[in-house]
Image (cartoon, rainbow, N blue to C red):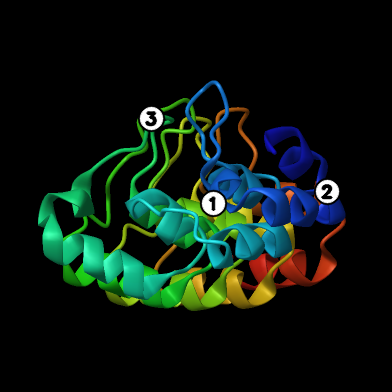
Amino acid sequence: MIEAVQAGDVARVASLLAADPALAGARAPNGDSAVLLAAYHGRREIAEMLVDAGAPLDIFEAAAVGRAGRVAELLRQRPELAGAYSHDGWTALHLAAFFGHVAAAEALLAAGADICAVSNNSSRNQPLNAAAAGDHLDVVNLLIVAGADVNARDGSGFTPLHAAAQNGNTAIVRALLNAGADPQAQQGAGRTPLALALEAGKQGAADLLRSSR
């Protein structure tokens, strides 16, 4: 099952689930569930298949696939999960932010999730960094309104604005600038958001950043 999920083999996953629905809860040797691996590999259809087949969802899996009802249920049972870290160093809010699940993020914030939590891995980022990197304007706006640090730096010195500029997402660039993001911030190698936008060929983002100087 794990190999089929990583390969994005929808037909194989369907066949395996038909033969043994319990495989929906399969885990890789490192502890990642099939559901989480599907999310990490961008296999949204497979993730939904696994959930629909009855895969058990912990707080991280539920956040990653946007099952806000399950997130809320788990938080009612164990409120401390709002601040828990996955084995690979993410909070549930990081995962909801990166994968663009507004309702799950709202449930986590309502339960007291730390909006400025730093991931416990090499990324060393905050949820707003994750939302910007994942290209999700709705979550970016939610986190800004909730008080996220718009100039938070990750382990490479990237701010959310660096990520948005590199992605060429002008709506997120604009939202961050309007919230006070520093257009002159330099990441570890000394590059500004404008430099990253130009390197990536994102002219719209570059024009917006130029006009903000």
Quadrant for residue 134, please give it: bottom right
Q: Secondary structure at mark 3?
A: loop
State the CA–CA distance, disc 1 to disc 3: 35 Å
Q: Residue 149 has which mark?
A: none
Task: Left or right? Give the position of 118 relative to 112.
Answer: right
Task: Left or right? Give the position of 106 relative to 139.
Answer: left
Q: Secondary structure at mark 2?
A: helix
Residue drawn where x is 48% and y is 68% of the image: 66
Q: What residue is pinned by disc 2?
A: 12
Q: Residue 87 has which mark?
A: 3
Task: Left or right? Give the position of 37 relative to 79.
Answer: right
Coordinates of residue 137 in the picture (x, y in percent):
55, 74
Q: Earlier in the sequence, mark 1 or mark 2?
A: 2
The amino acid type of the residue labelled 1 equals Gln
State the CA–CA distance, disc 3 to disc 2: 28 Å
Quadrant for residue 197, please give it: bottom right
Image quarter where the N terminus lies is top right
Residue drawn where x is 74% and y is 39% of the image: 6
State the CA–CA distance, disc 1 to disc 2: 49 Å
Asked if the residue under mark 3 is in contact with the one under mark 1, i.e. CB atoms within 8 Å, the reply is no
Please say whether residue 183 is visible from this viewpoint: no
Q: What residue is pinned by disc 1?
A: 184
Q: Viewer-nearest of labels 3 and 2?
A: 2
The amino acid type of the residue labelled 3 equals His
Q: Earlier in the sequence, mark 3 or mark 2?
A: 2
Is the residue 119 above or below the residue 98 in the image? above
The amino acid type of the residue labelled 2 equals Arg
Is the residue 139 above or below the residue 130 in the image? below
Please say whether residue 101 is visible from this viewpoint: yes
